Image: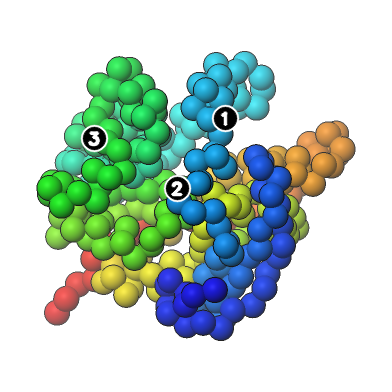
Amino acid sequence: MNNCPVCGHNDFEFVYELNDYRISQETFSLSKCLNCTLISTLAPPKSSDISKYYLSDDYLEHSNRKTDLFSIAYIKAREIMFGYKYRIIKKFITNGEILDIGAGSGHYLNFMSKKGFKCTGIEMSGRARAFAKDTFDIDIYPDDHFYNSTFVQKYDLISLWHVLEHLYDLEKVIKRIDDLLKPKGHLIIAVPNYNGFEQVVYKKYWSGWDVPRHLWHFSPKSMKQLLAKNNFVVTEMKMMPFDPFFNTLLSNKYRNGHPIINVFRMILVGGMAFFQGFFNVEKASSIIYIIKRKEIN
Ligand SMILES: [Zn+2]
């Protein structure tokens, strides 16, 4: 492996060999940087081949119409989460321009535009972009637009909700965010946290690894280091309240547990993980990092 993309060191330790339990069933390995603690997915597919490891747009469209309990719970939880995200955001900004990277079908941006924000998104999937435009009249651009030097708009808030761990070039992304963020702007990055309780329980079956789609696996230490070297600082950290339960549900499925026992596990392990994150956000299943530029004196 090359040098660590966060700290540049090259002392690594092997973590797990694990499968892409969700889609391809192929085997991958995880390697941890002994300096900054970033865990990397070793030898991931090339970016030009990664789309086959994602569910097709057809599948996503189908699953949006699903009426099973899991999908209903997911959609309900998503709506509650929009309110939760908004309550976090409105503490430091109540209007202005938002850029959401990895905007999907634009449901979150639609929610935020109703709250008075001017919203723009970046999204790889053409079908998701078209859906957002047709359904919500929100402009969502393809990812090459994000890197295009003619894209010079400045934003008050840039968000990446469970997106950064999917992006190949961390440094390039953070530098581009630096270009597009207003001097007093805020950045929000939400990612899974491998220091959480479920990872300790499920180990290689923990759904937060999600290889090879997740290329990087952050701890608070490695996230803060990545940001610090780009002159950003974390001002606050928040948990994602539903992630312990969804992660436990998925991790149980990957481990092929008995369905009845899995329900108890979801309540027990999910509950334990929830409370651990509630009392100590550094151990939350996923962490929302609220970030601003370092003050230069
Ligand atoms: Zn490192």
- The quarter of the picture where residue 177 lies is bottom left
Which of discs 3 and 2 lies nearer the camera? The answer is: 2
Residue that mark 1 sits on: 74
The amino acid beneath tag 3 is: Cys
The residue that disc 2 covers is: 48
Give the Cα distance between marks 1 and 2. 30 Å
Q: Secondary structure at mark 1?
A: helix
- Between the C-alphas of marks 3 and 2, the distance is 29 Å
Label 1 or label 2, whichever lies nearer to me, is 2
Label located before the other in sequence (1 or 2): 2
> Would the CB of label 2 be found within 8 Å of ligand 1?
no
Q: Is label 3 in a helix, a strand or a loop?
A: strand
Residue type (three-letter) at the residue carrying disc 2: Ser
In the image, taking residue 230 as reference, residue 260 lies left or right, namely right
Quadrant (top left, top right, bottom left, bottom right) of the C terminus: bottom left
Which residue is identified by label 3?
119
